[in-house]
Image (cartoon, rainbow, N blue to C red):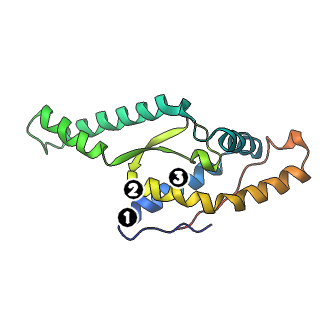
Amino acid sequence: MQFNRNAKHDADEFSRQLKNQQDGMNKLTVEDYVKNRGDYLANGRSSAGNAAQQAARDNAYNNKVSELLSNETVDSLEEAERQAKNWLDTQAALHDPDQVAGGFMNNVTGVGDAGVNSSIGSQWKTRIGAVDEVVDEIVRTTPYDNLSKIYLDVKLVP
């Protein structure tokens, strides 16, 4: 499944986030996907994962402050905190995969460039239907007890 990178977005970051989306999807069983996707379609994006998102952001901030101090690229803790905050303002907490793509609301795997994350997230709207069709066919032709044993197998390419 093709995703398009905006020329202003870093190619490596786009590929990293897309690969993490793919890896996250391929860890989902058909049963997980159907439940999570159904919840998303019925209720939209869940706010129940907000604590996980904040924890990921807090962890990233603390790691960035430590990195700046250990690399001796700043003169003070205050400067490290200021730079870390400015950096964090450009980052988004990442679900792998996004909730729209069947991901768990509390499965936040870290942070990444917010523009790249928004770009990938917005592209799901026109792509997820293809996954839904394949999963619907599996559900129609597979005994229910087996749906927890079948994993998704998607390929996302930049």
- First in sequence: mark 3 vs mark 2: 3
From the viewer's side, name the closer residue of 154 and 103. 103
Return the residue at label 1. Answer: 9
Dot 1: element = loop
Cα distance in 3D space between marks 1 and 3: 17 Å
Q: Which dot, 1 or 3, sits closer to the camera?
A: 1
- First in sequence: mark 1 vs mark 3: 1
| Res 56 quadrant in image | top left
Q: Which residue is at a point 13% across and 38% down the rendered structure image?
A: 79
Cα distance in 3D space between marks 1 and 2: 7 Å
Q: Amino acid at mark 2?
A: Gly
User: Which residue reaches farthest front?
Assistant: 43
Residue 103, percent from left and from top: 61, 43
Residue 29, percent from left and from top: 73, 44
Q: Which dot, 3 or 2, sits closer to the camera?
A: 2
Q: Amino acid at mark 1?
A: His
Label 1 with label 2: CB-CB less than 8 Å: yes
Q: Residues within 10 Å of mark 2 (few under 14, many from 20)?
A: some
Return the residue at label 2. Answer: 115
Return the residue at label 3. Answer: 20
Q: Amino acid at mark 3?
A: Asn
Dot 3: element = helix
Cα distance in 3D space between marks 3 and 2: 16 Å
From the viewer's side, name the closer residue of 34 and 68. 34
Residue 42, percent from left and from top: 69, 40
Residue 126, percent from left and from top: 62, 63
